[in-house]
Image (spheres, rainbow, N blue to C red):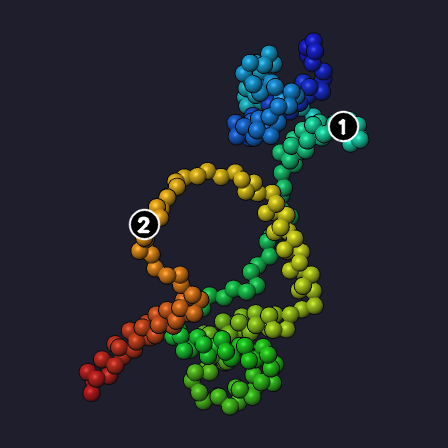
Amino acid sequence: MGWSGTSDSDLDIVDKTASFVARNGPEFEARIRQNELGNPKFNFLNFGDPYHAYYQHKVKDFREGKGQEPTIGGGPAPSKALLSATQQKQQDILKQVEQPFIPKDPPAEFEFIADPPSISALDLDIVKLTAQFVARNGRQFLTNLMNREQRNYQFDFLRPQHSLFQYFTKLLEQYTKVLIPPKDLMFRLKDECDYMGSILEQIDWHDFVVVETVDYQPFEQGNFPAPTTPDEVGARVLMQASVTDMRWAAPTRNTLSGRA
């Protein structure tokens, strides 16, 4: 099918766009309309264009399964040196939708995460400090500690059959990685930083909507609390843990006094 004033490559762009819009919905059409604003190659997206009716007809055919899908990448690819910047951008947009990214490998597991068990703050600190000292001083320190504290119930988590032994082992592995990092850790961290930087560069930081604006007059004085420092946050956490320990200990004391 040929039209006067329209080349086969132009009709190919119309057919490919119609195929992608039929598969991906009107959001994809709005995206192309925004990215190709002012590009005469995509004037068929406008209602007043003479080829808009043909484009709508092709979208309908593709949605109903009547249209023949255009061949992607058929024939020799034109040289980049011969393509204009606009044509190259068109091909890049079509290729992004044509070949979606499918991850081959599962994401790496979190290395530095361990849910703390439901124990008191004191017992939790003992487990963490023990894991830190063992990670720093080695297995010999652990052996000496087990021999010295074998009758101390607060160090029962060092026994493999104890319920906290797996949590202690997980902390030991994490502290060892931090205190004695592997040789390739810096290169891995640098690669992760570069990867995150490339993701942030793809974000349009100017694409936002102002929901509401609150203006304060010079004579207005808001009753706001002072900013909280990290030390104050830590003190509140310790205080909350102490209150929790007291609540757990209160029923025990009442039971003992009742028996007495």
Q: Residue at x 39, y 71 (%)?
A: 235
Residue 233: x and y, percent? Answer: 40, 67
10 to the left or right of 213:
right
Tell me the quarter of the picture where residue 184 sits: bottom right
Q: Which mark identifies residue 220? A: 2
Of all residues, the one furthest to the front in this rendering is 219
Q: Nearer the viewer, residue 179 or 164?
A: 179
Residue 256: x and y, percent? Answer: 24, 83
152 to the left or right of 140:
left
Q: Amino acid at mark 1?
A: Leu
Tell me the quarter of the picture where residue 172 sits: bottom right
Q: Amino acid at mark 2?
A: Glu
Q: Residue at x 55, y 65 (%)?
A: 112
Residue 74: x and y, percent? Answer: 74, 27
Position of residue 35 relative to residue 192, above or below, is above
Neighbourhood count class around disc 2 (C-alpha, 10 Å): few under 14, some 14–19, many 20 upward: few
Q: Is residue 100 visible?
A: yes
Q: Residue at x 51, y 90 (%)?
A: 148
Position of residue 253 relative to residue 31, above or below, is below
Position of residue 192 relative to residue 121, above or below, is above
Q: How many marks?
A: 2
Q: Residue at x 52, y 27 (%)?
A: 26
